[in-house]
Amino acid sequence: MTDSTAHIQLHDELGERRRAAGRSIAPVTEAATLTGLQLQDRATIYRTDRMRPEVDAFRELRTQLLAVASGNFVTLVASVSAGSGGSFVARNLAAAFAFDASKSALLVDCDLRHPSQHRTMRIDPVNGGLIDYLDDEETDVSEVIYPTGVAGLSLLPTGASRETGAEYFSSLRMRLLLDSLRGHHPARYMVLDAPPVRGTPDARILADLADVVVLVAGYACDTPAAIAQAASNFDPAKFAGVVFNEGV
């Protein structure tokens, strides 16, 4: 795995549809546990007794988020620009949440133009993913959530590719999905891997569905002005801070 350092600076009808969505959720079957070498190849952190700066960085990030949010909150991770490492941070933050044996994590790949999580984790989304679920009301969400080989960590990939997610992410079905997943798994943390802020409105729309927002800036790549402009897209009450990512 490429070494990386991260640092954060903390600054009725509807009811029936919710119940119907909830009934469709089933547990995810775990895959064979990946080895440390396999996880390094997937650029994913793992528990170890050795001192590893990147593992400690994501544990610290998780700890700081737990200090500012309560319950099984939903975290949106969005990069300032393409190449800043937002997907890397989202994946490893989700892995850090899953370190706690009493908790679990669900990583949701919301980058519809450039999905990467299923490829990085070597997962074949044979049943589709998020967009397939949102497009087809007959699809059971349990069919499109995949084990990753990391204990306690599951992946909901994007599935079908789309140019924009605006109409999907602002839909009632998307909101019901997250509400149902949260309600049926009170010990699960969800991490939404968003597209870069620059270029599409998707990250801003997804922020409405999240409890906290983490912005990822590429170290020595994104200027202070670009970071400030990207941060201004989010509600200050939800904005947790900026992760400076190096070496993705």
Image (spheres, rainbow, N blue to C red):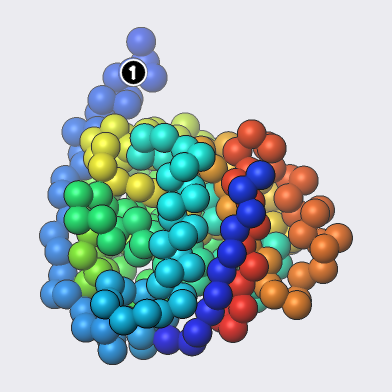
Spot the residue most to the top: 12
Examine the rendering and report whether any part of residue 129 can be seen.
Answer: no
The number of numbered discs placed on residues in the rendered structure image is 1
Examine the rendering and report whether any part of residue 4 can be seen.
Answer: yes
Q: In which quarter of the image is residue 227?
A: bottom right
Residue at the (36%, 62%) spot, across then down: 96
- In the rendered image, residue 192, in percent from the top left (x then y), is placed at 47, 53
Note whether 122 is above or below 115 in the view shown.
below
- In the rendered image, residue 106, in percent from the top left (x then y), is placed at 33, 54
Note whether 157 is above or below 74 in the view shown.
below
Q: Which residue is denoted by mark 1 in the rendering?
A: 15
Viewer-proximal residue, 151 or 17? Answer: 151
Q: In which quarter of the image is the C terminus?
A: bottom right
Viewer-proximal residue, 150 or 47? Answer: 47
Q: In which quarter of the image is residue 197?
A: bottom right
Q: In which quarter of the image is the N terminus?
A: bottom left
- In the rendered image, residue 5, in percent from the top left (x then y), is placed at 55, 75
Q: How many neighbours does mark 1 have within 10 angstroms: few (below 14), some (14-19), or many (20 or more)?
A: few
Residue at the (37%, 80%) spot, across then down: 51
Relative placement, left or right, of 180 versus 213 is left
Residue at the (33%, 18%) spot, across then down: 15
- In the rendered image, residue 11, in percent from the top left (x then y), is placed at 66, 44
Q: In which quarter of the image is residue 162?
A: bottom right
Note whether 69 is above or below 85 in the view shown.
above
Spot the residue most to the right: 225
Residue at the (64%, 68%) spot, across then down: 244
Relative placement, left or right, of 169 versus 223 is left
User: Tag 1: residue type?
Assistant: Gly
Relative placement, left or right, of 9 versus 17 is right
